[in-house]
Image (cartoon, coloured by chain):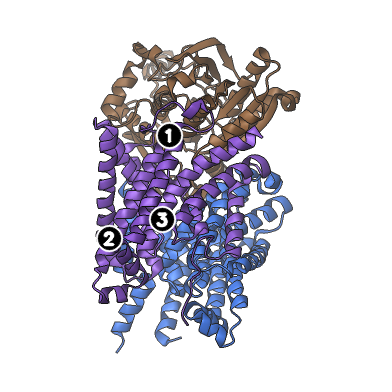
Chain colours: A brown, B blue, C purple
């Protein structure tokens, strides 16, 4: 009898624990179907480059064997940055195309429109492409997660820096009149706290449809501001940088992270006119001379040459798409053979110090079930006329 | 109405009622949007097709209706069905008021004024003094209504039938308007406004009324659209929306009630098809479709249908 | 006071942008009695062609004139191939075709050239005139070029037989045919000229605002307003209108209502002006025969 028991036990124990393959709709042995919406048309179509970069990145991953042997099927639809269209396309992806999860849907209003839907349907709304703060709310919206350092954090960091280095500063802010601009504005105001009205002497807005921001820059100079917080997208950033120089206004100039590309913003503005710009960054900037021989960027450069030969490497959106793509691939690799939506969310919320070489040194990606902000660290850098020079320590939002 | 038209309408009604049970929820949602756009286009057609006043800013009235509903539902807890007539009434008044200065403007100049209205709408919605009501750039999220009386429908199907019912009412209203004295007056003003005035038609009153009624239709559509999408934000109502409405009535058929439905199908589904064809330049494909439709059917789909059916008649 | 002067001068610079596109709009209207919504995108597209030529190594002025020539041919081509077939269609159908053109040009340009901004060179010196810090030499030069184009157009329509023929063809196609004017070719010529004027506008505007596919999008409303407020059939009115709109927009935005309501104010101004002078300030009042 004892021998039988031992034998049975031995037999049971010697069978290797078979990893259970678990799938939700959108995943199987061969593929992982990922859905996305991006503005490929309309006034925000510049951001559509992110979708193209991500698609190219997934293609590269597939060519290299896929994720745990499965190919990524990336389905991306155009929503023209119009929330009703985003709702329609998100429903199509979830209900008709049966994707496993949505990834990097772009735009704050677009994501707000599908926020409740995604959480009701229990489909991950992963690594949304917006810097708004509200995506870090695992208690109420456990299926939604952001990725990039949020705008308010960045605004707060600049405010703290101003208070520390220039206590008598008079700050003028130029911001785009939409959620992106207003989020940065709020961040800076919150950063100043009770002293906001003492520091901020002028807040001037512009619309994406405005031809130039020259008038706004002139207004800021006239307000007596000696510190300039520049919350503009690339085209307007270049205009503002150049105009400030041309009218002889030399403020301490903080530039938001969206427009820091040396190749596509500072060079058109004029490298000599961009000396002294301060920004908080988390990604390496490929056209910056300091990374010209960086080994860590080689895979990215090869990727651009092979998979996006017609795209502009100076366009931030490409390295952004590459890096966020790498993030979700890391999470998916962690999922192993358990490709349920629940597990995708769980693994995305369990990234520990993930280091990607396209991020600035010292910055890693960490998430926990209570902390849905993958990247919270940024580092300040100053432009010296040729490249961005990092200074200070890596800062986090807390 | 001829017997053939009545039969066609009956078939349409049967199909419309059966569809939500045949197709997926997602398609039902799309069809609800088609109905919404049809009402909006009918409104624009009353003004531009039948009365000849070009409006490149009807997105503004759509937005007004949508925000009426959103604000009433979110800030004041008004049930969704009660907000629809309010949205319509508000837009009727605002449209009429806008129609008054518009009286002095003809053709191109009116187009410019309405174009400016369309362009200014998102900025107005974002205005910080109104933020308390409009939610500013963040917009307003609306809860999805549930089917009442415990009907065995899911929310998408219920919403579809609710929208269908209102669409039917609006279309009957529109039809009676156009066929009646008011409609004839509007058409007379469009074609020969001096003769119309000479014949005793009070041009100013009718033209402003046309604006008001047209805005009301589009406002009701906006309200229904807000409930269907469950979200309003300033960026949903930019100038492109107004332009797409104009494209819709031209492609569907100016001065035609059925044209509103054809146009709605066009503006809802063709952009999706364009997206499938080319991700690199979806608007370009959409533009090519537009040109194609206008070349093949200069009087719109409704005009082409009329030609075909007339040819078939003995 | 200095701030006001600065805004006024900045307004003249942006006004120059509006004026140049408004000229192209007036041009097309005088030739065809239609307002071309795609005018801005055509200007933008031809400017990209100029950019490509300069990137390929061509010096500025040869590239400039070659671009103007290409734009002219493009305009003629568009009229013959795209607009001709719908000539008999209702006016709004033609407007839809213009809108389609706008979408196609915008989308295709974004696809070919991407959305990264490009610098477009300026033929004017980089140093501002007298070292002033209000207007760059290019902005002054652009205003100058706009005025030159205006003068050339005015002279063309007023003093040349061809200009007269074009105006006649637009105003009264039937009678024009009776006196032997080739109306079809007059229309094509009108489109060609408008496209050429547009390309000049684009090449003057691009150094100020940077070249990108959405460069002309925001300008269209203001150019449209400038053209109509100045009188749609009057090139000088369009230019004056452009400067007025530019200055008003800047001054009101900076001192009166803030930038958040600039567009709404533009709307109110447009309606206000048109209520008082329905044909615009310099337009001829339309007399319709009963």
Quarter occupied by the C terminus of chain A? top right
Tell me where residue A257 appears, x and y as whole percent. Answer: 51, 25
Return the chain for callout 1. Answer: C
Label 3 crowd bin: few (<14), some (14–19), many (20+), radius 10 Å: many
Q: Are marks 3 and 2 on the same chain?
A: yes
Sequence-first disc among 1 and 2: 1
Front disc: 1 or 2: 1
Name the one closer to the observer, B152 or A54. Answer: A54
Q: Secondary structure at mark 1?
A: helix
Q: Residue at x 56, y 83 (%)?
A: B197
Sequence-first disc among 3 and 1: 3
- Residue B116 in sight here: yes
Q: Which mark is residue B39?
A: none
Q: Residue at x 62, y 22 (%)?
A: A227
Return the chain for callout 2. Answer: C
Q: Which mark is residue C188?
A: 2
Residue receiving disc 1 = C138
In the displayed structure image, the side of residue A113 where residue C43 appears, left or right: left
Q: CA distance from mark 3 to mark 1?
A: 23 Å
> Quarter-wise, where is residue A304 in the image?
top left
Return the chain for callout 3. Answer: C
Above or below C172: residue A395:
above
Residue at the farthest front position: C159
Label 2 crowd bin: few (<14), some (14–19), many (20+), radius 10 Å: many
Q: Which mark is residue C25?
A: 3
Q: CA distance from mark 1 to mark 2?
A: 32 Å
Name the one closer to the observer, B172 or A342. Answer: B172
Q: Secondary structure at mark 2?
A: helix
């Amino acid at each position: 009898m004892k021998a039988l028991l031992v034998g049975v036990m031995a037999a049971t124990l010697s069978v290797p624990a078979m990893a259970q393959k678990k799938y939700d709709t959108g995943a199987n042995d061969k593929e992982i179907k990922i859905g996305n919406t991006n503005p490929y048309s309309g006034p925000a179509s510049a951001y559509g480059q992110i979708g193209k970069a991500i698609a190219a990145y997934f293609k590269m991953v597939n060519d290299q064997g896929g994720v745990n042997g499965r190919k990524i099927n990336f389905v991306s639809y155009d929503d023209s940055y119009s929330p009703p269209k985003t709702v329609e396309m998100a429903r199509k992806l979830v209900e008709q195309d049966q994707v496993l999860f949505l990834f990097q849907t772009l735009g704050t209003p677009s994501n707000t429109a599908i926020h409740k839907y995604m959480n009701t349907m229990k489909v991950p709304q992963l690594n949304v492409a917006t810097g708004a703060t509200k995506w870090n709310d695992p208690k109420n919206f456990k299926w939604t997660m952001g990725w990039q350092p949020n705008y308010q954090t960045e605004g707060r960091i600049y405010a703290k820096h101003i208070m520390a280095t220039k206590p008598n500063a008079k700050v003028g802010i130029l911001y785009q009149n939409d959620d992106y601009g207003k989020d940065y504005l709020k961040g800076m105001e919150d950063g100043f706290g009770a002293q906001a009205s003492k520091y901020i002497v002028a807040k001037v807005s512009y619309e994406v449809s405005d031809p130039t921001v020259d008038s706004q820059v002139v207004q800021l100079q006239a307000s007596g501001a000696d510190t300039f917080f520049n919350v503009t997208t690339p085209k307007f950033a270049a205009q503002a940088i150049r105009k400030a120089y041309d009218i002889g206004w030399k403020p301490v100039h903080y530039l938001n992270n969206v427009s820091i590309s040396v190749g596509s913003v500072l060079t058109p503005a004029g490298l000599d006119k961009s000396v002294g710009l301060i920004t908080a960054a988390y990604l390496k900037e490929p056209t910056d001379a300091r990374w010209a021989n960086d080994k860590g960027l080689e895979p990215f450069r090869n990727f651009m040459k092979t998979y996006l030969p017609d795209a502009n490497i100076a366009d931030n959106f490409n390295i952004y798409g590459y890096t966020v793509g790498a993030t979700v691939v890391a999470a998916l690799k962690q999922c192993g053979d358990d490709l349920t939506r629940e597990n995708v969310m769980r693994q995305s919320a369990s990234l520990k110090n993930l280091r990607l070489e396209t991020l600035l040194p010292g910055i890693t990606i960490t998430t926990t079930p209570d902390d849905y902000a993958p990247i919270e660290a940024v580092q300040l850098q100053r432009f010296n006329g040729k490249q961005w020079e990092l200074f200070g320590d890596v800062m986090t939002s807390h | 109405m001829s017997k053939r038209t009545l039969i066609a309408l009956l078939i349409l009604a049967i199909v419309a009622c059966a569809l939500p049970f045949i197709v997926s929820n997602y398609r039902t949602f799309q069809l609800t949007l088609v109905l919404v756009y049809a009402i909006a286009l009918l409104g624009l057609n009353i003004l531009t097709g039948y009365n000849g006043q070009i409006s490149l800013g009807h997105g503004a009235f759509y937005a007004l209706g949508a925000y009426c509903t959103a604000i009433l539902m979110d800030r004041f807890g008004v049930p969704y069905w009660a907000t629809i007539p309010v949205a319509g009434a508000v837009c009727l008044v605002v449209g009429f008021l806008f129609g008054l200065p518009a009286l002095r403007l003809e053709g191109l100049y009116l187009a410019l004024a309405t174009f400016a209205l369309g362009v200014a709408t998102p900025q107005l919605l974002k205005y910080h003094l109104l933020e308390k009501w409009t939610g500013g750039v963040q917009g307003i999220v609306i809860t999805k209504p549930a089917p009442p009386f415990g009907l065995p429908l899911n929310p998408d199907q219920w919403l579809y039938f609710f929208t269908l019912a209102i669409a039917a009412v609006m279309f009957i209203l529109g039809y009676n308007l156009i066929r009646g004295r008011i409609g004839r007056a509007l058409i007379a003003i469009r074609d020969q406004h001096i003769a119309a005035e000479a014949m005793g038609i009070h041009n100013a009153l009718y033209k402003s009324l046309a604006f008001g009624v047209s805005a009301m239709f589009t406002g009701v559509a906006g309200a229904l659209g807000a409930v269907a999408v469950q979200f309003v934000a300033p960026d949903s109502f930019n100038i492109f929306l107004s332009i797409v409405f104009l494209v819709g009535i031209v492609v569907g058929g100016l001065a035609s009630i059925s044209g509103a439905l054809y146009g709605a199908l066009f503006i809802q589904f063709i952009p999706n098809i364009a997206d499938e064809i080319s991700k690199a330049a979806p608007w370009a494909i959409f533009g090519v479709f537009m040109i194609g439709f206008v070349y093949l059917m200069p009087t719109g789909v409704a005009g082409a249908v009329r030609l075909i059916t007339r040819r078939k008649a003995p | 006071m200095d701030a006001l002067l600065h805004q006024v001068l900045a307004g003249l610079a942006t006004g120059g942008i509006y004026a140049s596109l408004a000229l192209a709009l007036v041009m097309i209207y005088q030739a065809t009695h239609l307002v071309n919504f795609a005018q801005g995108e055509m200007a933008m597209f031809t400017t990209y062609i100029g950019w490509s030529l300069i990137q390929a190594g061509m010096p500025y002025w040869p590239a400039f004139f070659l671009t103007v020539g290409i734009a002219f041919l493009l305009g003629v081509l568009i009229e013959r191939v795209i607009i001709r077939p719908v000539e008999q269609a209702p006016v709004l159908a033609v407007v839809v075709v213009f809108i389609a053109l706008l979408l196609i040009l915008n989308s295709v340009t974004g696809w070919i050239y991407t959305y990264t901004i490009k610098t477009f060179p300026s033929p004017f010196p980089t140093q501002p005139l007298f070292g002033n810090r209000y207007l760059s030499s290019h902005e002054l030069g652009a205003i100058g070029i706009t005025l030159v184009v205006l003068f050339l157009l005015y002279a063309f329509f007023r003093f040349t037989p061809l200009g007269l023929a074009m105006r006649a063809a637009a105003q009264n196609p039937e009678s024009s045919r009776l006196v032997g004017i080739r109306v079809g070719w007059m229309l094509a010529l009108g489109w060609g000229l408008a496209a050429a004027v547009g390309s000049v506008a684009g090449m003057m505007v691009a150094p100020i605002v940077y070249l990108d596919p959405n460069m002309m999008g925001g300008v269209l409303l203001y150019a449209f307003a400038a053209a109509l407020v100045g009188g749609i059939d009057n090139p000088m009115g369009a230019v004056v209108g452009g400067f007025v709109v530019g200055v008003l927009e800047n001054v009101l935005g900076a001192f009166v209502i803030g930038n958040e309501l600039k567009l709404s104010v533009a709307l109110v101004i447009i309606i206000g002006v048109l209520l008082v002078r329905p044909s615009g300030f310099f337009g001829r009042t339309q007399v319709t025969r009963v």
